[in-house]
Image: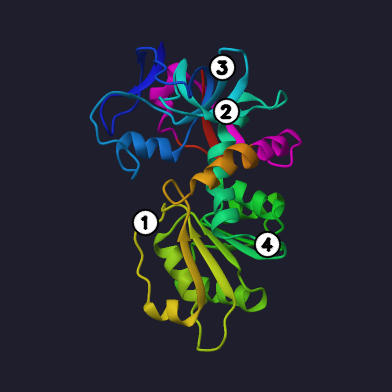
Amino acid sequence: MKAAVVYKKGELPQYTDFPDPIIENENQLLMNVKASAVKNLDKNIASGKHYSADDKATAKVAGGDGVGFLEDGTRVYALGVTGMIAEKAIVDKNKMVKVPEDLDDCTAAALPNAVAGSAMALRFRADIQKGETVLINGATGVTGKIAIQLARHYGAEKIIVTGRKEETLKALLDLGADEYVLLMQPDEDFIKHIKKIHSTAPIDIIIDYLWGRSAELILKSLKGDGSFTPRTRFVSVGSLGGDTIQLSSEILRSVDLQLSGSGFGSWTKMEMKQLITEILPEMFELAVSKKLVIETISIAINDIEKAWDMPLADGKRLVVTI
C-alpha cells in the first residue's frame, strides 16, 4: 500500500510503499482510509517530542486517527492501531464512531482531536456548569476555536479569549466569544485587564493551550489578598508558549484554585468511552447542522512531504486525503 512513512525521528514523512497492516486479534478491523488530519500531536509524536512517543527506532506510518470504510462498507471515524495516513490501517472496533452521511470526510477527520482537546477539559476536568465564565488562553488555534463553540454549547454565560493577533481575536467574537485580551501588550496591562474581568465576572474556568509566560500572568492575576475568593478551575491542555512556568506558593494559598491537566494519560477509561460513544457522535451531528464549524485545508497523500510543515492560517486544520 501507499503510506506516509517516518523512517527517523525528526524527518519528514515520505510518500512510499509500505507493507499492508495485519489484523492481530478479534477486536481489530481493517479500514480503507479516506482522510486523516495532521495535528500538532502527530508531528510531536513523529519527532519524538511528545510524552507518548514510542522510543523504538523503526519506520512508522504517520497519523493517529482518520475516516474511512470498513470491509462491510460502514463509514467510520476511528483511532488507529496502526498509522492512519495510509491507504489501509488497522483500527480498534471499540474506538470508532459512525460518520453521518451528510458530513464530509475532511470535517469528520479534523473535528475529533479538537473536540477531545476541548470537550474533555470542559466537561471532565472543569466540570462546566451553565452560567459560568470561561477564559480560553490561546483561542485562535483550531482547538481554541472549537473550545469557544463548545463552551457556549455547554452553557457558558461569558467567554473571554486571548491571543497574539488582534485581528484574529476580533473574528472570534463572531464565533461566540464575548471579550478578548491581547497577549502582545505589557505584562502589567495584561494583568490589569484580567483582574478587571475577574472582579466583575469571576472567572470560573480557564482552558489553557499555551502555558509558559501567559499562564504565569493569568495565575498572577488571580492572586488574592486574604479575603474569600471564587473558585477557579485551571486546566492545562497545551504548551505552545513553553513547557514550564514559575508559580508562586502565595497564589496557591491565596485563591480557591484547582489546577489540572487534560490529555492522554489523564483521562480515565470511562471518560474515553464517553468521548467515543457520546461526545463525538453529538459533535458530528452539530457539525452536520452547522452549529459546530471547523476550517480545513486538504492535500493529497502524495504531497505529504511538502505539506507536513507548511504554514496554515490561524485555526485551520490540514487534512490528508487518500
Label whose residue precedes the other's in the sequence (3 or 1): 3
Of residue 131 and residue 312, the one placed in the foreground of this image is 131
Residue name at image x 56 percent, y 76 percent: 195
Between the C-alphas of marks 1 and 4, the distance is 30 Å
Q: Which residue is mark 2?
A: 77
Quadrant in which residue 241 is drawn: bottom left
From this view, report whether residue 44 is shown above or below residue 225.
above
- Give coordinates of residue 5: x percent, y percent: 34, 22
Between the C-alphas of marks 2 and 1, the distance is 32 Å
Residue name at image x 60 percent, y 53 percent: 167
Q: Which residue is mark 4?
A: 129
Residue name at image x 41 percent, y 81 percent: 250
Q: Which residue is mark 3?
A: 70
Q: Amino acid at mark 2?
A: Tyr
Eye-nearest disc, 2 or 1: 2
Quadrant in which residue 251 is drawn: bottom left
Residue range (magenta): 281-310
Label whose residue precedes the other's in the sequence (2 or 1): 2
Q: Which residue is mark 1?
A: 242
- Give coordinates of residue 15: x percent, y percent: 38, 17
Residue placed furthest toward the bottom:
226
Between the C-alphas of marks 3 and 4, the distance is 38 Å
